[in-house]
């Protein structure tokens, strides 16, 4: 099938169970969620969720419509095909005796990443960027010995003046849906 | 004014227009039960919480109003689960209230604590755990709003014992606002799409309406009839769409699907324009999906955008509440004449008639249903069990009024019939309510006979007693070489059981006794049970074998009840 990575952004009310309900819809369809990132939005008591899943377009669209039916989901859009800014943050703890620290710092500099903690035999790197950039850095430091990785998963929003899930505006995806029909 | 959480809840229910609650008490809900008599709320004590949920369901289907059930925490709540799932799959408006352990005990595996909001997450339209007594009015308002609007469904409210008991200074607000920015219950159908649909109907030579339960939910049966009559479009329905169009109408061609009329399924296979209204292309309706309505363009009118394009490709989708959509559509419809198409359907009907219930000598279940229709003048509400009894009740009674056929479709829950009939009778006390049930299904909720007596609910029960889990036996006969594993069913003497509950009853073994027994039941003041000892191995026909297309419908072999069916050519079950 035409499986590909989809980025969905949802504006949700901060109520218990809302994430549960969302994730449960994907579980039911056998989707593995690549990443899910949640945090406060610009509106009080509402959060914005970014979900990345791999799946066929038609099924993801059906799940998106079902997500939209969850009472606490205010808006949800598939922004995969939009012009978007997407970022992820990763913390990577690498084995580093003082002898090889310099070498690691050089790599970190090239990626415009940061060393945020230094231990006796380790350093912790913080890197922000898209998944490819993070993967590239990981490939370069793997040889030193990775002790731990923690990643936020993707967050994303459209470029320019448009929002992914604006509250006020008439939902564009609804208009699109009707047009498609 | 000091009010307890229990009182605030009751006040909220009264304001929502609730008049009856089906429930069962326990520790966590005691502070609620204690104040219940202060309010004009009738409480009906069921004998198992599953019965409470099904009764609320039957009440809701019969009246169109939100049904309410109530259970204590833990086992009380889990006993509701099947009934809630049943309501969810058939889009029935219901509010289920459960007790929970006191707030300080939540999450600690306290006595009778269960995470019922977690358990019911995928089978409710929404649910609440109430942690603040003062939030009860808004939770109640929202719950009824969500349950009863848009595509209806069950909403569960879980309330800790100490919230019921807590006394707070409180004035019930005159109006309670609903603050649900994420809830868009109704959409108006898009005018351009409605225009497209009207054009497609005008162009079609063989149009066919396929009506589902959405028509009943929307109260759109008049608009549907107007559409059908004006444009002369024949109508078929789904199982749950029964009653959305009068079955004795000249344009009615009955029910489609696995046990639909052969001529109805042939109509679907022959139409050039299928107008699907308020239905969701369930696999029991469509048969093999890629052979469904092979010659048709499809118009799909439904309130729920997530149903559009889910199972079949749609040419003209219209998302919107059905009654207003049909009103708009009717303005654009011109009178038409499809005499040739209707003649083709009449020909289907002549060549593929339904099983004739008057045929043969034994006591046929179809004959019993046929006579229930005659004796009730077609005016009764019929609730059913699940299995063969359900299909015969759907096939051999003529439903002319909305909400007169009450049956578990999506979940297919055995045990639904008796408590659902009970709820329907409570909601419509002036209607005659018959429960047409199977001997297996009835035994799953038979304890509700006691409820009928205690609360004086005059439901009439017709047991189609075949001594088998008949529908499963039928599959074993057709697809598993007649190996009847775990389907022969020992049954108690149902008449004696009824007698044990002080319910009048009769056993009928001969066809000539059917009508007198039914007349006796109708004349009797109060509940009545008739145990019809029907042909044990009678099968439900027509049947579209699982995995086959609607065009490959199997019809009744001439001597079906003697078991002379040629099974060699049948496809093998894949469901
Ligand atoms: C709760 C539940 N368990 C199992 C089934 C599977 N099932 C479907 S029909 C049927 C047989 C029903 O037997 P009975 O109530 O006697 O009805 P009959 O088919 O004989 O008319 C069974 C077991 C079901 N639908 N529901
Ligand atoms: Mg049976």
Image: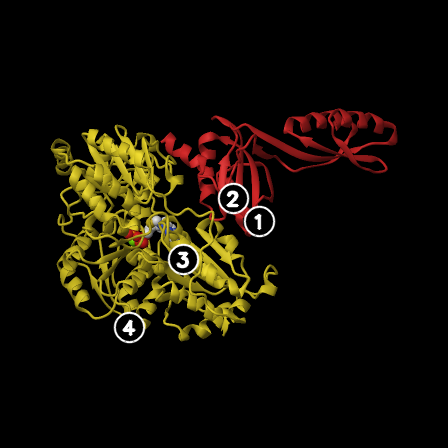
Q: Nearer the viewer, residue B21 or B45?
A: B21
Q: Which of the numbered marks, if any, corresponds to residue B502?
A: 4
Residue B357 location (% of width, % of height): 16, 49
Q: Which of the numbered marks, if any, corresponds to residue A22?
A: 2
Q: What's the image's color scheme?
A: by chain
Chain under disc 3: B
Callouts 1 and 3 close, C-beta under 8 Å: no
Residue B322 location (% of width, % of height): 30, 44
What letter labels the chain drawn in yellow? Answer: B
Q: Which of the numbered marks, if any, corresponds to residue B144?
A: 3
Q: How far apart are marks 4 and 3 (CA)?
A: 37 Å
Question: What's the colour of chain A in the image?
Answer: red
Chain under disc 4: B
Q: Which of the numbered marks, if any, corresponds to residue B468?
A: none
Q: Determine which quarter of the picture holds residue B531.
A: bottom left
Residue A39 location (% of width, % of height): 61, 44
Chain under disc 1: A
**Nearer the camera: disc 1 or disc 3:** 1
Above or below, B148 against B564 in this view is: below
**Nearer the camera: disc 4 or disc 3:** 3
């Amino acid at each position: 099938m035409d499986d590909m990575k989809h980025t969905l952004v949802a504006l949700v009310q901060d109520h218990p169970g809302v994430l549960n309900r969302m994730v449960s819809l994907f579980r039911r369809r056998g989707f593995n969620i690549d990443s899910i990132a949640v945090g406060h939005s610009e509106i009080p008591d509402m959060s914005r969720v970014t979900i990345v899943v791999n799946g066929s377009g038609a099924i993801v669209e059906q799940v998106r419509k079902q997500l939209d039916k969850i009472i606490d989901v205010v808006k949800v859009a598939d922004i995969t095909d939009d012009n978007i800014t997407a970022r992820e943050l990763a913390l990577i703890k690498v084995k580093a005796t003082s002898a090889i620290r310099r070498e690691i710092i050089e790599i970190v500099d090239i990626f415009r990443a940061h060393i945020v903690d230094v231990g006796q035999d380790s350093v912790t790197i913080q890197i922000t960027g898209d998944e490819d950039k993070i993967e590239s850095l990981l490939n370069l430091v793997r040889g030193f010995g990775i002790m731990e990785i923690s990643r936020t998963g993707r967050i994303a929003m459209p470029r320019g003046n448009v929002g992914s899930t604006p509250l006020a505006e008439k939902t564009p995806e609804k208009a699109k849906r009707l047009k498609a029909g | 004014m000091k009010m307890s959480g229990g009182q605030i809840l009751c006040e909220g229910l009264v304001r929502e227009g609730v008049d009856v609650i089906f429930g069962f008490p326990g520790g966590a809900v005691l502070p609620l039960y204690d104040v219940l008599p202060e309010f004009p709320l009738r409480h009906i004590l069921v004998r198992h919480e599953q019965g409470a949920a099904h009764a609320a369901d039957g009440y809701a289907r019969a009246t169109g109003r939100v049904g309410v059930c109530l259970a204590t925490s833990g086992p009380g709540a889990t006993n509701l689960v099947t009934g809630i799932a049943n309501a969810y799959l058939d889009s029935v408006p219901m509010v289920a209230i459960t007790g929970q352990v006191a707030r300080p005990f939540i999450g600690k595996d306290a006595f009778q604590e269960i995470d019922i909001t977690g358990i019911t997450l995928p089978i409710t339209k929404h649910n609440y755990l109430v942690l603040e007594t003062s939030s009860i009015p808004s939770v109640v308002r929202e719950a009824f709003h969500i349950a009863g609007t848009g595509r209806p469904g069950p909403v569960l409210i879980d309330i800790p014992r100490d919230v019921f008991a807590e006394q707070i200074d409180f004035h019930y607000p005159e109006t309670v606002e609903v603050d649900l920015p994420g809830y868009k219950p109704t959409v108006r159908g898009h005018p351009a799409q409605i225009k497209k649909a009207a054009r497609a109907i005008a162009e079609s030579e063989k149009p066919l309406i396929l009506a589902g339960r959405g028509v009943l939910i929307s109260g759109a049966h008049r608009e549907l009839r107007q559409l059908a009559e004006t444009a002369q479009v024949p109508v078929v329905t789904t199982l749950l769409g029964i009653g959305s169009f009068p079955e004795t109408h000249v344009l009615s061609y009955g029910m489609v699907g696995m046990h639909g009329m052969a001529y109805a399924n042939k109509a679907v296979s022959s139409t050039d324009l299928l107008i699907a209204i308020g239905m969701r292309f369930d696999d029991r309706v469509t048969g093999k999906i890629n052979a469904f309505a092979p010659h048709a363009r499809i118009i799909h009118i439904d309130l729920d955008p997530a149903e559009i394009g889910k199972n079949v490709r749609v040419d003209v989708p219209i998302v919107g509440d059905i009654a207003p959509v049909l009103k708009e559509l009717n303005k654009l419809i011109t009178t038409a004449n499809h005499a040739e198409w209707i003649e083709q359907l009449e020909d289907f009907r002549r060549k593929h008639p339904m099983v004739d219930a008057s045929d043969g000598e034994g006591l046929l279940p179809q004959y019993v249903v046929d006579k229930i229709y005659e004796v009730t003048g077609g005016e009764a509400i019929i609730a059913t069990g699940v299995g063969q009894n359900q299909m015969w009740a759907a096939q051999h009674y003529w439903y002319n009024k909305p909400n007169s056929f009450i049956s578990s479709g999506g979940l297919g829950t055995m045990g639904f019939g008796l408590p659902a009939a009970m709820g329907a009778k409570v909601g419509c006390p002036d209607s005659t309510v018959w429960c047409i049930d199977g001997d297996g299904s009835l035994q799953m909720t038979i304890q509700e006979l006691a409820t009928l007596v205690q609360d004086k609910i005059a439901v009439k029960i017709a047991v189609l007693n075949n001594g088998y889990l008949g529908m499963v036996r039928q599959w074993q006969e057709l697809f598993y070489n007649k190996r009847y594993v775990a389907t022969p069913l020992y049954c108690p003497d149902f008449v004696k059981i009824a007698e044990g509950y002080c319910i009048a009853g009769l056993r009928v073994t001969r066809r000539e006794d059917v009508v007198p027994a039914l007349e006796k039941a109708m004349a009797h003041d109060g509940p009545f049970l008739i145990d019809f000892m029907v042909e044990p191995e009678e099968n439900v026909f027509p049947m579209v074998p699982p995995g086959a297309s609607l065009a490959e419908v199997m019809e009744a072999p001439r001597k079906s009840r003697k078991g002379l069916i040629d099974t060699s050519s049948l496809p093998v079950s894949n469901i």
